[in-house]
Image: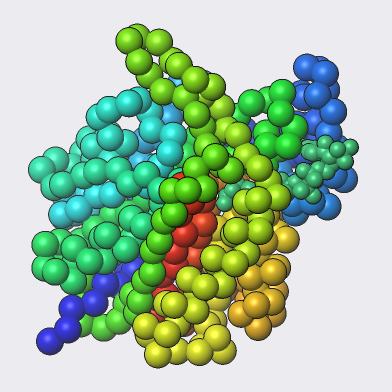
Amino acid sequence: MNIYTRIAGTGSFLPPRRLTNADLAAELASQGVETSDAWIVERTGIRARHFADAGVGSSDLGTEAARRALEMAGVSADELDLIIVATSTPDMVFPSVATMVQNKLGAAGCPAFDVQAVCSGFIYAVTVADAMIRAGSASKALVIGAEVFSRILDFKDRTTCVLFGDGAGAVVLEASEQPGILASDIHADGKHRDILSVPGHVSGGNVLGDPVLKMDGQAVFKLAVGVLEETARASLTKAALQDSDIDWLIPHQANIRIMQSTAKKLKMPLEKVVVTVDQHGNTSAASIPLALDVAVRDGRIQRGQNLMLEGVGGGFTWGSVLVKF
Ligand code: ACO
């Protein structure tokens, strides 16, 4: 008998402080940085983002998202036998956000660890959890993407600080006799390190380097569009499915123009693409599970439909997961 990994529940959480483009533009103007709602909407599709208050970390956002996913799945925290958190903005250097979430949920004992693949982190984390479930080493797994990117933005750099937001999304995965995750595909190529990075680190009690996000937007754009098509096709091939078998495309929410180009290459109408970038901005590893949860809860995504989740991010990393919901 084959064991598959099924999504038993989804959840998400956004910190309450919401800034529209106009709110952000006003805050930036007070520091002498000029931007506008019109520029941000035209180049990115973003209209608003949420920022966590001081003292609120990825583990807080991730725990709230996890509670909602557990409730939908009808699973209690002490039944979990695996917790993986995808994040590039952990609460501290260590311990991991996953162990903090485990503690906040009141669970103990199961393995808990973080995965660092930037905006592809959730795809990587689901791929690892799926492999562990199919190998029989876990049967109920919590996978979270949680980020507070507002902490690593340079608010003097208008080319990056308008793009990102904070939030978390989660799924509860369960071993099942029914599919389930049909295929996944993950990749990395470290030679592209410098087009998207936060080049700082802790050493000798000091933060060295420049611990804010740096990006060559046009280089990222070009690479992203190519690899997102390739990885979606790789997952389709592994599952012996066609473009037309995808009911919903749930891409990493970086920029509406990247999503439009990917949808076009996969011959999918935009109505079949779940878009939350307009309201959330780019929440890195949280963006895919956040978008998934929004479309599950508003009734667009139905049981039995085929979902293509895909992401690309710093590293460079990229990948996709094709799942029958
Ligand atoms: N407000 C107003 N003007 C701005 C802003 C801003 N926030 N940012 C840049 N500009 C100006 C620039 O200074 C430049 O002015 P100039 O012509 O006088 O020199 C002009 O706008 C054009 O700048 P470009 O950088 O060429 O703009 P571009 O069309 O490339 O858009 C963007 C920039 C949106 C970042 C685009 O390159 C992009 O979408 N890249 C993809 C990267 C991405 O989405 N990354 C997300 C993180 S990575 C990931 O998640 C995978």
Q: In the shown orientation, is residue 82 left or right of residue 213?
A: left
Question: How far across and down, in percent of the image, does residue 94 sit?
Answer: 27, 27
**Residue in the image at 13% along x and 47% along y:** 110
In the rendered view, tell whether residue 143 sits above or below residue 113.
Answer: below
Q: Residue furthest front?
A: 191
Residue 58 vs 309, above or below: the answer is above
Residue placed most toward the observer, 31 or 214: 214
Q: Quadrant of residue 104?
A: top left
In-image side of 196 versus 65 (left or right)? right
The reply, left or right, for residue 48 in relation to residue 12 is right
Residue at left offset 55%, top offset 76%: 248
Residue 185 percent coordinates (x, y): 38, 69
Residue drawn at 15 percent across, 61 percent down: 138
Q: For residue 133, which quarter of the picture?
A: bottom left
Picture coordinates of residue 173, whole percent (x, y): 28, 64
Quadrant containing ligand 1 reads: top right
- Asked if 129 appears above or below 119 in the picture, the reply is below
**Residue 144 rendering spot, x and y as whole percentages:** 37, 50
Residue at position x 39%, y 63% from top? 186
Residue 48 seen in the current view: yes
Between 162 and 231, which is closer to the camera in this rendering? 231
Residue 153: quarter of image: top right
